[in-house]
Image (spheres, helix red, strand yellow):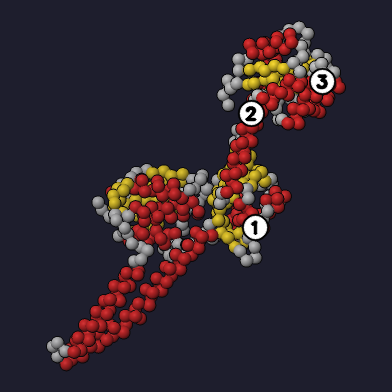
Amino acid sequence: MADDEPITVLYVNDDPQLLELISTQLSREAERVDVLTAESADGGRALLDERAVDCVLSDYHLTEETGLALLRDVRAERPEMPFILLTETGDERVASESIEAGVTDYVIQEAIGNQAPLLARKIVTAVEHRRTQRRAERTDRRLREIVSVTEQALWMFDADWSELRFINERHETLFGQSSDALRADPTSFLERVHEADIERVTTAMERASDGEPQVVEYRVEKSEAVELWVESRCKPVRDDDGTVSAIVGISRDVTDRKAHQRELVRKVDQLEEFAGTVAHDLRNPLNVADGSIRLAAAEREGESERLGTALTALERMDTLIGELLERAREGERVGERQRVEFAELVTGSYQNVHAPGSSLDVTASVPLRCDPTRVMEAFENLIRNAVEHGPSDVTVTAGVLDERHGVYIEDDGPGIPEAERERVFEKGYTTAKGGSGFGLAIVERIVSSHGWSIAVRDGTDGGTRFEIVVGAG
């Protein structure tokens, strides 16, 4: 609201001289105040029906009825309108009845002196306070309308999770628990969390209370027959002195995403199973070819029928191999290659991961000739691995290897023991609870499909460093 936004005041007094004097003084004292006048309570009521009024200033001692009666009528129809009552005496009974009727302020009129500065200040203060309240109410109403249709549960707890300050209706959809039940016991949502995931969730809650933004995925047993995967993201709210005063966050259903990951793993399993049985599928045509060629050689028959059979079998083998390679490459194809700066790829990947509290430091860049979509997918998985296995404020550093023959992405997390480095790219291998063990396997496949190689090293600050060699030039 602008400081000079006009204010319309209705001043009611049955003394014409006082009515003119005070209204003139008010207008001179505050240019933004526009004064309407009425010589009776009924006249005031008529003006309230006709004009937009921000505040009522009324004398208590009116001829036909008191200003208190007017106050009661205004409160019946306009309960929030500022109303200031002027009286000539400090009668305790009048003051008590005025307060009970909902007066905004009560001013004793002095016999001499200019009270316009005091009245103007009280009028402006009361009107600005009411306008601020109305703006806040409108904002709150709009926010509630927005959160009522969002697909995410929005919530706010106090710093130690002992009080629920806000929750929208989506919580009940996710957890199968009413908002009233959660308000009565703010940590009761943990009763719906899968037993194997409770420790991970409570740890994230403790870290959030300590001031660390958190991202956690866990299973929710909505009912005996329904289980969901939920992702919760939260951020601490701090006071001016830095103390955590509240925790705000969102929770959303990621069951479909988890199902997609499981389906991806299943397809890869099928592909590997297929590749494992190829030797058996090829054995028969190879045996036929071998046997036929041997007989042809023994009989020394030039272009014999047996040699034709051998050629047919070899052609069949070639077809099978072609089909095998075609299927083995599904999901690993590299699209059209482009020259893209490493810094651009890794920065975009970091932004896609959405890891509040973490940071990215790109120390150098080099152009890479690659399929940018697939390479960003690989970088996202490397960054996500750092976030999931490291502290919430993990720092990810990206740069160029010596002689510019490759790039690296490292973190300052706990690192990977040397004994486990050979296994981290195996499908299904993970040390994180709830992890699919597929992220680094995807990285290795994408890197290999580009003709590059990847290795795990010690990070500069003791964390994990992934080095990707792309070759000279």
Identify the element where label 2 is drawn: helix
**Residue visible at 63% across and 11% down in the picture:** 28
Q: How crowded is mark 1: few (under 14 residues within 10 Å), some or many (20 or more)?
A: some
Disc assigned to residue 176: 1
Count the marks.
3
**Residue visible at 22% across and 86% down in the picture:** 309
Q: Which amino acid does label 1 sit on?
A: Gly
Identify the element where label 3 is drawn: loop
Closer to the eye: label 2 or 1:
2
Q: Residues within 10 Å of mark 2 (few under 14, many from 20)?
A: some
Q: Is residue 315 left or right of residue 139?
A: left
- The residue wearing badge 3 is 65
Closer to the eye: label 3 or 1:
3
> Gap between marks 3 and 2, in whole Å?
30 Å
- Residue lying farthest to the top in this orientation: 112
Q: Examine the rendering and report whether any part of residue 139 can be seen.
A: yes
- The residue wearing badge 2 is 131
Q: What residue type is labelled 3?
A: Glu
Which of the 4 image quadrants contains residue 371? bottom left
Q: What residue type is labelled 2?
A: Arg
Residue 342 position within the rendered picture, expressed as x and y whole percent measured from the top left? 34, 48
**Image height of 280 relative to 336, above or below:** below
